[in-house]
Image (cartoon, coloured by chain):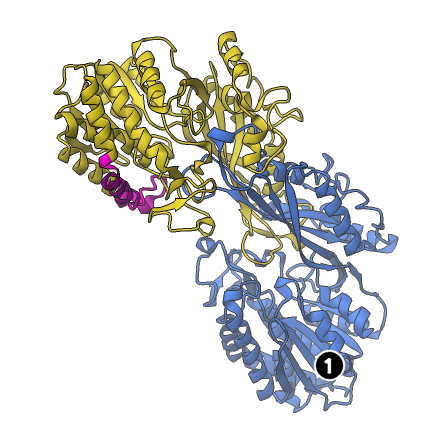
Chain colours: A blue, B yellow
Amino acid sequence: MALSDTDLTAALAAVDDGLETSLTRLKDLLRIPSISTDPANKADCAKAADWLVHELTELGFDASARPTPGHPMVVAHDQSANGPHVLFYGHYDVQPVDPLNLWHSDPFEAEIKTGPDGEKIIVARGASDDKGQLLTFIEACRALKAANGTLPAKVTILLEGEEESGSTNLAPFLESAKDELKADIALVCDTDMYDERTPGITTMLRGLVGEEIEITCANRDLHSGMYGNAARNPLQVLSEIVASLRNADGSVAVEGFYDDVEELPEEVAEMWRGLDFDGAAYLGEAGLKIPAGEQGRSVMEQITSRPTCEINGMIGGYTGEGFKTVIPAKAKAKISFRLVSNQDPAKIRAAFRAHVRARVPKDCSVTFHEHGGSPAITVPVDGPFLAAARTALSNEWGRETILTGSGGSIPVVGEFKHRLGMDTLLIGFALPTDNIHSPNEKYNLTSYHKGIRSWVRVLAGFGG
Amino acid sequence: MALSDTDLTAALAAVDDGLETSLTRLKDLLRIPSISTDPANKADCAKAADWLVHELTELGFDASARPTPGHPMVVAHDQSANGPHVLFYGHYDVQPVDPLNLWHSDPFEAEIKTGPDGEKIIVARGASDDKGQLLTFIEACRALKAANGTLPAKVTILLEGEEESGSTNLAPFLESAKDELKADIALVCDTDMYDERTPGITTMLRGLVGEEIEITCANRDLHSGMYGNAARNPLQVLSEIVASLRNADGSVAVEGFYDDVEELPEEVAEMWRGLDFDGAAYLGEAGLKIPAGEQGRSVMEQITSRPTCEINGMIGGYTGEGFKTVIPAKAKAKISFRLVSNQDPAKIRAAFRAHVRARVPKDCSVTFHEHGGSPAITVPVDGPFLAAARTALSNEWGRETILTGSGGSIPVVGEFKHRLGMDTLLIGFALPTDNIHSPNEKYNLTSYHKGIRSWVRVLAGFGG
């Protein structure tokens, strides 16, 4: 259903007028510690799902929490409009908060603070990733309904509770609810702006392969005075394996890793060369100077269009206060690969495991534990929905919308494509400085406010 | 004061008759969780010291706990005899107990169990290292006094509470109490038998250099989707450093590490060749097959007469349940070196730090924290005390006493030599299977019982 300029203006005014109460709702959602990876927070995840069902029901959606073997899915429909059918996706689960001592305020008691450049920010775990972002869409629906009584398009909302822990139950759920969820286009709000004043639509996403490995040497912890030298040390073995994963030129050393990696299409490469992306500033903001990835590739390439291998965690031996001269029996690492273009997660996982096995001494052993796998995604850059969204975003922000790539993985986009035959527009209002997955995560008040306004315009544009 | 055969027989009988109540005392001491490295156990360390003062006072010693900036020293004197003056040293502190879930019973509630070969064992943290061992000496004094009313030698007892945490306050204490502690010979009970039926006196001890390093890359934890590849990963940097510490042939790769390492004296090498030490069985008991140290060196050499570098702990990134795609800001390792012959701890520490610094990327940093340093010790193998002790031990165990080396470090021996001008006899009744520093630490009941009898004979021999 087309939206008149008057109706659009009314809806945008409703966003502005309702911002304070909208913030209160965001704070309520942020108060729920829905850390999906930690079994201790299972009830909190259910609580967050119920909170969303309640809000969406109040808004006139037909909403419910659907159980899975893990955390529930929230599904809500309002298909009363005549326009096209959109499926909006977000996730209500959040990352763990450790190390807690680095937070300047309670991660689950959102505070409005002033950022380094005088901007207002909302500080809490999930403020940006993804509770703040998903609420921009729901609050846009609220404003549209408040102003016009209805939405300009048929809307289905799908909110997942396991995005931060491998999305184990997403694929089976999509498979079982295929008919209910299939729409004309999917909208995902889990990505960044191009910069804080320039809207972006992400058309390239890296895939992910997560692995946990455990090396076992002796049958028990040993005393280094009694066994040191002769007994194989699993921390030494693990370190040698980790060190072997990178070549001196920064490339990944797993055999065949780059076999299916394609160069950027020339037109995209050309567009990126025209951008003012400052790799040194991007690294500098994180306190770094020297790009650690493949030599000869720009920072933008390294973080978006080139694959990587990262060590996400390692532990073994005595790590408490003081010193203990132990040779541990075991050592563990969590290792992940970010994939691009045609890299096959199964093939990369197998190549990694072969690489590791070849480096484990014959009297030691290794076990592998899988933590998710998804291929990279490239979203087509033509089509009416993308065009309408670009225009809507450019109108809201007063700047041309940039098409970009994201180094992160959003497996749901691949699932939507392969299971539901649906393309996805990745539109988000987060910033690289949001400290997502880190202490003191924040979301700019502007991201939230203009994010809501952006969705009002995007939905209006789809209906028009 | 010489001890007649009758007096010796009476004292040995007193040991046998008093074994049950002696075990009760050992259990009482084992019940105190005197983990010196953990600040949470500070009061427990003081409690263990007080328990020992109480027992020694009851035995007629002039005993007291002496405060230090860390845990107290226990000092006790009984110099009523006419014989030579011996200084006995042991330590009442114990190692941490993690991982607690691998213990089959409460580490601080000693239980008498049956070992794999039907032998009786006392299972508890400290049962062997060093509470069980130090009590063998005190209980020997008890039996001698019970049977004969006096000791055959002047005895000073020094019990430390920081042996497992770097002995920070030992040197200054020895310095300040030099005159009080100086004796004709020092006796240390913190070592192994040669095997479970053969007594041993350790005449070679490796030194120790402990280091903790922390690598810092970014100014905060980063999301690997946003920074992966371009941002330096401290776990990768740390792993590359650790991997670089060993050459492919098993030798330590720190520059100059072997400069001051001497080959074994030919007579010791000859004696060792004559022993039936089974390196494969020693490693096999720990579940290993391939010696990890320098190729071409026997297991016995690797664990006693050759220096080593061990990784005692590593931690960084997300190590909890599930997965977190983080690039941590920091990664840490605890690394120690076991030194031999003339290796200088200060020189080795400096060489290690230079090795590390050369491998830290320019935009990252490293901090070092020192955890103790002591040179290796070689005890002279002649002299009347050693001869008397060999005879006493051979008489008790019915087998020739073996002179051997220990891979562990007992810094106090160097301190006795350099500060007090005193040689040390290292006589202990522990076994390589005692799981010291590991879950399910144990001490054989035979070690305890015949250990006490051994000290009765050794002290009698000194007096005679």
Q: Circle 1: is it few (<14), some (14-19), or many (20+) Cα within 10 Å?
A: many
Under mark 1, the amino acid is Ala
- Main secondary structure of the magenta stretch: helix
The percent coordinates of residue B296 (x first, y second) are 63, 19
> In this image, A35 relative to A303: left or right?
left
> In this image, B451 relative to A260: left or right?
left
Magenta span of residues: B17-46
Could you tell me which secondary element the residue under label 1 belongs to? helix
For residue B423, above or below residue A343: above
Q: Quadrant of the C terminus of chain B?
A: top left
Q: Is-magenta flag for residue A436?
A: no
Q: Quadrant of the N terminus of chain B?
A: top left
Nearer the observer, A98 or A242: A242
For residue A189, above or below residue B197: below
Residue at the image position 55 percent from the left and 15 percent from the top: B273
Nearer the observer, A151 or A345: A345
**Which chain hosts label 1?**
A
Q: Is-magenta flag for residue B30?
A: yes
Q: Residue furthest right?
A: A266
Mark 1 — residue?
A: A460
Residue at the image position 64 percent from the left and 25 percent from the top: B247
Residue at the image position 55 percent from the left and 19 percent from the top: B257
The percent coordinates of residue B76 (x first, y second) are 18, 28
Residue at the image position 72 percent from the left and 64 percent from the top: A411
